Image: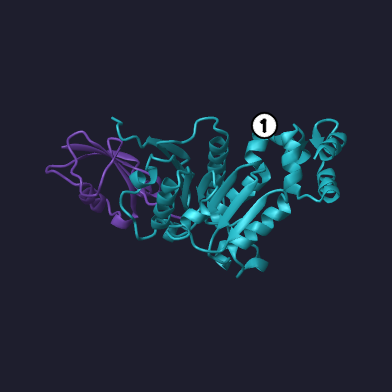
Chain colours: A cyan, B purple
């Protein structure tokens, strides 16, 4: 490993390791790009692809992101953008969960949906996309629905879960599993021009407070549809929450809910604290 | 009895953003929702004076009712 560190230092005189040298190191030392990345970051060498993450994200924080694991449950409108941004950020482990295949009506908004992928599994398309944009990131595709039965296994070793689901009952199931596994959950939902965001910390029961009725019927997305811009907005807000949760920085949207109205351009924040006035 | 009703997102299209309304008898959230022509299933989050409330809850003089549509897509 000392030889590897020396190799990386030689190739990164300014502290930035070019992609080609990271790949060469992996080949020379028989390691994965991920292993080389971890060694580099541990030795204060930044893979050059992340140089524009600075100073928003320090090298120590980049290492923390790399060592983290995020489950994205639902790889459609929200999930696609979330996974893309997590991979570009350098989150080291992504679990991409979705049992669906792409359909033609996904093409208007779902980032990984392309005409040639109609009929292909969304989770697998997500993993292929991650491998293309950042091969140092490990993305585990799970082409199954998130259920009571597999939930705990899918959340094992996960630091944060992200909600990219499309119904309230499915979200409550995910929220309950996150509570059981003591994992924070970043909730997002969209319909038409409108979106919603909230972050549930373990023990807060935020989702059950937000949706006390189970809402078996779908929401206004049924007739409002989902255009391309709303998932991109809400997904980006979700990813910002993930970064803060993984790094324990900033002020997450805890015990609060954000209602985003892009039509009237109004953002309403309301408190979900039990003891509020 | 006066109740302030605040509508959010698409609920306000063709209706209003905020209105103080007069009711002669005690009124529930459900009655107000129905009176506004909003399908019950479309109601997502209900607040009375900033606190989570249910469709069956009865409003009191001076209450502010906020209605958000159910946003369930992903």
- Residue at the farthest left position: B25
Report which residue position mark 1 lands on.
A60
Quadrant into which the C terminus of chain A falls: top left
What is the tally of numbered marks visible in this picture? 1
- Residue A140: percent from the left, percent from the top? 62, 56
- Residue B60: percent from the left, percent from the top? 17, 37
Residue A105 as seen in the image, left or right of residue B70? right
Say which residue appears at 35% left-offset and 47% top-offset: A208
Residue A165 in sight here: no
Chain of the residue on which disc 1 is drawn: A
Say which residue appears at 48% left-offset and 59% top-offset: A150
For label 1, the SS is: helix
Front-lying residue, A177 or A121? A177
Q: Label 1 crowding class (10 Å Cα cut-off): few <14, some 14-19, many 20+?
A: some
Say which residue appears at 47% left-offset and 51% top-offset: A190
Front-lying residue, A193 or A12? A12
Residue A193 as seen in the image, left or right of residue B42? right
- Residue A37: percent from the left, percent from the top? 74, 42
Residue B28 in sight here: yes
Say which residue appears at 78% left-offset and 38% top-offset: A48
- Residue at the farthest right position: A10
- Residue A247: percent from the left, percent from the top? 58, 34
Quadrant into which the N terminus of chain A falls: top right
Front-lying residue, A240 or A4? A4
């Amino acid at each position: 490993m000392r030889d590897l560190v020396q190799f990386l230092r030689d190739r990164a005189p300014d502290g930035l390791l070019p992609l080609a040298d990271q790949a060469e190191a992996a080949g020379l030392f028989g390691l994965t790009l991920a292993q080389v990345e971890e060694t580099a970051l541990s030795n204060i060498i930044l893979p050059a692809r992340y140089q524009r993450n600075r100073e928003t994200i320090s090298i120590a924080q980049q290492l923390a992101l790399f060592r983290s694991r995020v489950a994205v449950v639902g790889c459609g409108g929200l999930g696609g953008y979330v996974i893309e941004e997590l991979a570009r950020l350098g989150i080291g482990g992504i679990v991409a969960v979705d049992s669906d295949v792409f359909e033609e009506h996904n093409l208007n908004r779902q980032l990984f949906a392309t005409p040639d992928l109609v009929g292909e599994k969304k989770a697998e398309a997500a993993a292929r996309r991650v491998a293309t944009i950042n091969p140092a990131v490990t993305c585990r595709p799970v082409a199954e629905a998130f259920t009571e039965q597999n939930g705990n296994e899918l959340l094992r070793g996960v630091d944060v879960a992200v909600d990219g689901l499309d119904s309230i009952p499915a979200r409550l199931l995910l929220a309950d599993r996150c509570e059981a596994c003591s994992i924070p959950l970043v909730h997002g939902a969209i319909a038409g021009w409108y979106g919603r965001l909230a972050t549930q910390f373990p023990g807060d029961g935020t989702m059950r407070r937000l949706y006390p009725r189970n809402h078996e019927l779908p929401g206004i997305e049924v007739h409002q549809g989902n255009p391309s811009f709303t998932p991109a907005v809400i997904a980006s807000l979700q990813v910002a929450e993930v970064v803060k949760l993984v790094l324990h920085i900033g002020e997450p949207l805890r015990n609060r809910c954000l209602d985003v109205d892009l039509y009237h351009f109004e953002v309403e924040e309301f408190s979900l604290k039990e003891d509020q006035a | 009895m006066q109740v302030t009703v605040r509508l959010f997102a698409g609920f306000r299209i063709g209706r209003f953003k905020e209105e103080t309304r007069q009711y002669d008898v005690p009124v529930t959230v459900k009655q107000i929702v129905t009176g506004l022509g909003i399908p019950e299933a479309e109601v997502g989050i209900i607040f009375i004076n900033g606190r989570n409330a249910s469709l069956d809850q009865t409003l009191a003089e001076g209450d502010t009712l906020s209605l958000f549509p159910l946003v369930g897509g992903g």
